[in-house]
Image: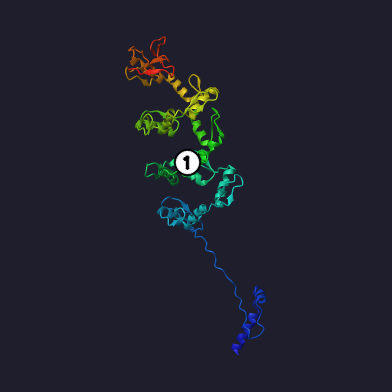
Amino acid sequence: MSLFGFFVITGERSESRPKPQHMDDINQKHPAPASKDEPAAIPVEKTFPAMKQPRRCKRANGEERSLSCDQCGKTFTLIGSLKSHQLIHTGVKPFSCDQCGKTFTLRCNLKTHQLIHTGVKPFSCDQCGKSFTQICNLKSHQLIHTGVKSFSCDQCGKTFTHRWSLKTHQVVHTKFKAFSCDQCGKSFTQIGHLKAHQLIHTGVKPFSCDQCGKTFTHRWSLKLHQVIHTEVKAFSCDLCGKSFTQIGHLKSHQLIHTGVKPFSCDQCGKTFTHRASLKRHQLIHTGVKPFSCDQCGKSFTLKTHFNRHYMIHVGGKSFVCDLCGNSFTGISRLKMHQLIHSGVKSFVCGDCGKAFTHMTGLKSHQRTHSGVKSFVCGDCGKAFIHYKSLWSHQKTHKVSSCEKSGRPMGHYPDRVHLNTVGETGVLNKSSSGCCVKLKKLEIRLHRIQL
């Protein structure tokens, strides 16, 4: 009785319970069976496992804690990112490209690299037409067209479009060059620069210019070279008017006008505007002249000097001035000459205001104000301000005589004994005797005894 009453009470209590709101929907989707023999449909609610969230390290107060690499100090918010990064320091690269053999630390980097071999670049810039294999590279490129440089160096003030460009630049101020070439010892701040440099030692130049055939080790060197053939010089110096194909060459040139020469030779004290000029100069002190002429045996320290000399043997004065007809062995000599016709004298002396067409002329003039006599005669010790003065003076110590007539030739060792022989074989002497200066090519020369 009591048990029955218990069920009655519980049944009443169960009827008084509120029906779940979603039960009506369940009954509509899963109706009761038509007969007792038919099993009732059991509602099953499909569930999905929750996506695994990135593991973040948080402090006790709920704030995210940054994870730092104990080798390089780089910080991360995700522990997975830190672990992936730490693989770089191990040097292990287990993922290799089956087409070029390049190895990678992470599989994702290998997959990204393999897109290069397909040649497919589906993401194109609508401003310049440059295409990319990945959309992230396109977005990074498009920032260049905006002109916005949000990242500034706190040491020199130079600004950059991308954060990674700033970080790469900041290594320059540390002067720490951790990556060294095992062949020549040259060191670099970035491993990418080291790898690009090491290609030089291989001697392989796979990139060729389709206009002149010149080959290059790097693709960017080819692109810089190809601008020459366009003859477009968009970057012009506002002081002397000289124009350049690249802005880097313009900036390097503008340093000349400042007069600042921060690079000094530790052997002779000579100063230079550019580091490259100092390095070229220091080769002189070594005495090494690896470039030798196979025609006359003369050797040179620099290849540019050898090339200029070699043009003499081949008779190549192919660069002719269209104003005066004067010809030169090199284009640089012609351009220097053409400045004379322009009348532009952009190099001005700060002491007297005298202007010169070339920097060499200004330097030679400035020695007059300094009074320094750097050129000393090895025979008598007399010193001169200019080299030409020393050269003229040294002739006085060389009294020459003609080997044919025995007559003294004075203080001019560059004179020769000349016989002008006509068709009849009669000797035609000049008014000054047999010892005259060379004037014509059809004469027979007798070398003098020094």
The N terminus: image quadrant:
bottom right
Q: Residue at x 53, y 53 (%)?
A: 118
Q: Position of residue 441 (x, y in %)?
A: 43, 19
Label 1 belongs to which residue?
Answer: 215
Q: Position of residue 254 (x, y in %)?
A: 51, 31
Q: Position of residue 13 (x, y in %)?
A: 63, 80
Q: Quadrant of residue 147?
A: top right
Q: Quadrant of residue 21?
A: bottom right
Vertical placement of residue 95 versus 344, above or below: below
Q: Find numbered disc 1 in the image and state the secondary structure of the residue it sits on.
A: strand
- In the displayed structure image, the side of residue 117 where residue 16 appears, left or right: right
Q: Position of residue 179 (x, y in %)?
A: 40, 45
Any part of residue 157 in sight: no
Of the pair 8 and 265, the residue shown nearer to us: 265
Q: Residue at x 59, y 49 (%)?
A: 124
Vertical placement of residue 77 versus 252, above or below: below
Any part of residue 9 in sight: yes
Vertical placement of residue 58 versus 442, above or below: below
Task: Give the amino acid type for the residue marked by disc 1 in the picture.
Answer: Thr
